[in-house]
Amino acid sequence: MSPPVRRVASSQDIPKSADVVILGGGMAGVATAYELAKRGTSVALMEKGVIAGEQSSRNWGWCRQQNRDPRELPLAQLALDIWANLNAEIGEETGFRRTGLVYATTRKADLDTWERWGRVARDFGVDTRMLGGSECSAMLPGNSRNWIGGVHSPTDGRAEPELAVPALARAAQRSGAVIVQNCAARELEMEAGRISGVVTEKGSIRASSVLVAGGAWSGMFLRHHGIRFLQACVKSSSFYTIPSPAVTEGGIAMEDVTIRRRLDGGYTVGISGLGQLQVTPWGILQARAFWTTFQVRRKGLTYAIGRQFFQGPEAILRWRADGLSPFERIRTLDPRPDQHLIERGIARLVAAYPSLAGIRPAQSWGGMVDSTPDAIPVISAVRSHPGLFISSGFSGHGFGIGPAAGRLAADLIRGDRPCVDPAPYRYERMIDGTDLGKPGML
């Protein structure tokens, strides 16, 4: 079951033209639409289902710098600056609170990793502090574990995914963006070697620029046009609880479970490091590119052949611009959560915090987390198709850094000075032989 996302009013008709057409109504697409519309660029956003219907409402709601890959840190820092002012700027509640995050562990290897990360992060000006065992326990009152240490980032925060993305979409609409839901894009249009528009199920829109921000579906859409996009999906299961006693006002990452306080007094709970890899045709074809990633992350994976093999974003399907596309067959990717993981999450939470005995899930959901081989997103122009841009492959980090990713994408589309160095996010690293190495930090 999907989280209770706040609904966004939808335009019934598509415009005949726009400066930019955005494909995808998750955080990446919506944040870009908002940034473009604020600057006077005409925007039409097409969403095959509803705004934030997929992973942008199914994440943990963490807005953090802590343990980000150094390549992502500039985006994470900018995003936190944007989050801090967003409620006042758009006049709506996003749920953002700068409450801090704590990571705690009983494993020395974790402390060594965090210490190395901290030395790099301090060069970026990140406020992060290692904790000894007693300090860690003092910061987590009521926790039953015997921690050997942890790390604390007091300036990180949290927000409510089901509130924030729709609120940002409405702000984009107030600035002039046109948002059309239940309208899938089928194909790009090209004239004289560059983008000239998009064919949707409701007709064509002329545009000089198109941004593909379709989350897990981006790869399928791009492959349809002969554009290789390395993207693999893992199914995750999460839930939020009934209102319960406060054990934290921020977020806590323990070795086997994460919790994040919610505005409604409950907790969003994640089961750390566990997911299901569904065997798919496209997954097999790109296995070599993801082999290093698989080796690093395989311990927490289970395997299955599911709906994705035949219909999902990693299936190999063909369609025509005048025919039904896969995006219309699956309006919202809504995988069932794994109930045994939900039960395990509750058990782990209560074991860590006995005061939460009797807590129960209010709602649970599955989600498809799409990743690139290096776990760094693509926010970039595509040189082979002038006028085409991508903002996808956020590897589970897209919600927190989304406001900054939207600003960077808008900068690149408009030709404005980039808000951060765009080099780490360039598309061509996937196709030019760049050694992508091991995946970045989660």
Image: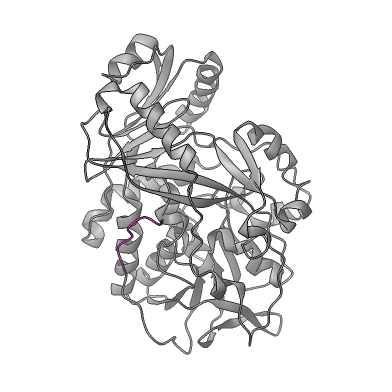
Using the rendered image of the protein, determine whether residue 326 is visible from the camera's viewpoint.
yes
In the picture, the quarter occupied by the N terminus is: bottom left
Residue 71 location, quadrant? top right
Residue at 43 percent across and 55 percent down: it is 56
Q: Is residue 258 above or below residue 338?
A: above
Does 6 appear in magenta? yes
- Residue shown at 41% from the left, 27% from the top: 348
Q: Position of residue 79 (x, y in %)?
A: 39, 48
Residue name at image x 59 percent, y 37 percent: 440
Chief SS of the magenta region: loop
* Relative side of 269 to 86, left or right: right
Q: Nearer the viewer, residue 264 or 392?
A: 264
Q: Nearer the viewer, residue 95 or 424?
A: 95
Whether residue 247 appears in magenta in the rendering, the answer is no
Q: Position of residue 335 (x, y in %)?
A: 51, 55
Report the span colored magenta: 1-7
Q: Nearer the viewer, residue 404 or 46?
A: 46
Note whether residue 125 is visible: no
Q: Position of residue 240 (x, y in %)?
A: 34, 43
Q: Residue at x 50, y 17 (%)?
A: 111
